[in-house]
Amino acid sequence: MPPHELNLKVGAVIMLLRNLNPSAGLCNGTRLIIRKLIPNVIDAEILTGHAEGSRAFIPRITLSPSDSNLPFQLQRRQFPIRLGFAMTINKSRGQS
């Protein structure tokens, strides 16, 4: 699950955490830069991959944790993104 609170600004680099549209270049680990913030959508430009330079809209989606031992199901509507300034070794291997 992404962090529950995220402070974003125009120009911040973000990383996508879900496969939204692989044919359009919106895959897990894709880096984007925020161009415009709208209440339920983020307008971003793709920085990596075959769709580099194209604009994409990232919607809020319903996420639920898979490892919950509770008798009820938790759900949150949030953006499937994380700040992308620091990456792990495994995520950075495909960026070069």
Image: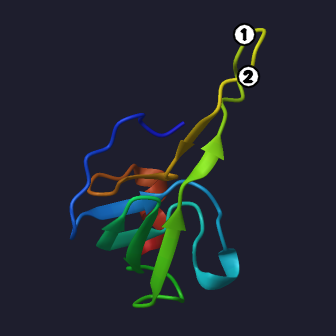
Residue 63 vs residue 15, the one in the foreground = 63
Q: Which residue in the rendered view is the most extreme toward the front?
A: 39
Q: Is residue 74 left or right of residue 87?
A: right
| Quadrant including the N terminus | top right
Residue appearing at x 52%, y 52% in the figure:
80
**Residue tagged by mark 1?**
70
Tell me the element at label 1: loop
Residue 73 numbered mark, or none = 2
Residue 18 numbered mark, or none = none
User: Mark 2 is on which residue type?
Assistant: Gln
Residue appearing at x 22%, y 68% in the figure:
10
Pointer 1 with pointer 2, Cβ within 8 A: yes
Residue appearing at x 21%, y 70% in the figure:
11
Q: Is residue 49 left or right of residue 61?
A: left
Residue 43 vs residue 16, the one in the foreground = 43
Residue appearing at x 49%, y 79% in the figure:
56
User: Mark 1 is on which residue type?
Assistant: Leu
Tell me the element at label 2: loop
Give the number of marks: 2
In space, the residues marked 1 and 2 are separated at their CA atoms by: 7 Å
Image quadrant in which you'd find residue 6: top left
Structural crowding at the residue carrying mark 1, measured as other residues with C-alpha within 10 Å and reported as few (<14), some (14–19) or many (≥20): few
| Quadrant including the C terminus | bottom left
Measuring from the top left, give residue 71's x and y in whole percent: 78, 9
Looking at the image, residue 37 lies above or below residue 45? above
Measuring from the top left, give residue 49's x and y in whole percent: 50, 82
Measuring from the top left, give residue 88's x and y in whole percent: 39, 49
Measuring from the top left, give residue 42's x and y in whole percent: 41, 67
Structural crowding at the residue carrying mark 2, measured as other residues with C-alpha within 10 Å and reported as few (<14), some (14–19) or many (≥20): few
Q: Is residue 11 left or right of residue 55?
A: left
